[in-house]
Amino acid sequence: RIFFFFLWLKFGFIFNAVILVLQVTGAGSGLGREIAIELAKRGCKLAIVDVHSKGCYETVDLITKTMPRCVAKAYKTDVSSPRELQLMAVKVEKELGPVEILVNNASLMPMTSTPQLKSDEIERIITVNLGSYIMTTKEFLPKMVARKSGHVVAVAALSGLVPLPGAGIYSATKYGIMGFMESLRAELRLSDSDYVRTTTANTYLMKTSGDLHLLNDAGISSSYPGLPTVYVAEKIVKGVMLNHRMVYVPKIFALSVWILRLLPTKWQDYMLLKFYNFDVRSAHLFYWK
Ligand SMILES: NC(=O)c1ccc[n+]([C@@H]2O[C@H](COP(=O)([O-])OP(=O)(O)OC[C@H]3O[C@@H](n4cnc5c(N)ncnc54)[C@H](O)[C@@H]3O)[C@@H](O)[C@H]2O)c1
């Protein structure tokens, strides 16, 4: 069994090539692009979805030039618009076939504190980061259940497990993803539909296009540099292939988070501020006064 399992891990893409259609939101750059490349290597047909058409086409070019036999198509879509989502879903299924793996990854990452955000900015972050994950799932999941196969993947963050002072709205959406995905998993299980799998990926800071000035100000990115997206994508895709419910990158964070939760509140705060290495003077960035 172990032998066949490793054989499948190594060569499983040959079988997947025939059946899997994958849709990655926010695949025009950063982690989404790397996840798409990683899954292309395993033979998936890809629907590259992003609000920026330039990024979409760049990802498609990158994949088709390095892997000429791979099928990848760009779908410029604003995932915060239910209408655009529905149109894109119809187009993807018509052109590529039924979606087997849905990867929700698109996100806005303003490391800006709540008092400094306008109401419409807050609404937009919540709609893109959380609303779109729910709406895409609502669009594709019923068909997965009807076909009795599929996989819903959500990219969350470690700031969905521990608070990120100074980025409360971003952190709230990531906690929200966790709640949604965990409920979804339980709902599928309770309705005997757990042949559709779910994976939530919680990753630490990465070297991408995110607006990370607040973390730089707080000294966090110099103390704990970001991870390369290629490494994170590899870990996530491996977790998806193994049907893992949760993927933590790096793994050690899972342990630290659960230990932190067992501590009294005062100790939690102490550890958190020690970790973020906040200079009290830079904390004015997120003061509510
Ligand atoms: N960068 C980090 O340090 C970090 C850490 C933990 C988790 N994450 C999470 O990883 C995921 C990817 O992050 P990233 O660093 O690659 O981000 P990124 O900014 O490089 O990429 C996000 C992509 O989403 C797209 N996008 C934004 N709004 C959209 C919309 N309305 N419709 C369609 N596409 C839209 C953008 O165009 C962009 O291509 C996000 O969910 C993020 O929250 C990032």
Image (spheres, rainbow, N blue to C red):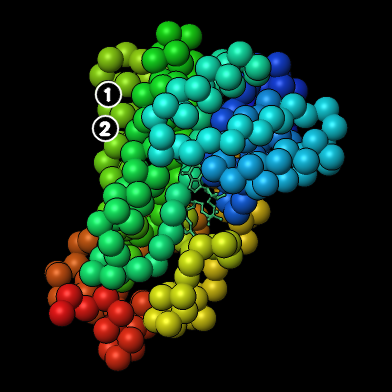
Foreground: 245 or 139? 139
Mark 1 surroundings: few (<14), some (14-19) or many (≥20) residues within 10 A? few
Indicate yes or no: mark 1 CB to ligand 1 under 8 Å.
no
- Could you tell me residue 271's position as x and y percent? 28, 76
Task: Give above or below for 134 relative to 110.
Answer: above
Task: Give above or below for 94 relative to 237.
Answer: above
Amino acid type at image mark 2: Ser
Residue 187 tag number: 1
Q: Which residue is mark 2?
A: 183
Residue at horizontal 39 percent and vertical 67 percent from the top: 111
Counting labels gives 2
The reply to whether the C-beta atoms of the residues labelled 2 and 1 are less than 8 Å apart is: yes
Amino acid type at image mark 1: Glu
Task: Give above or below for 212 relative to 63.
Answer: below
Residue at horizontal 83 percent and vertical 27 percent from the top: 69
- Could you tell me residue 200's position as x and y percent? 42, 41
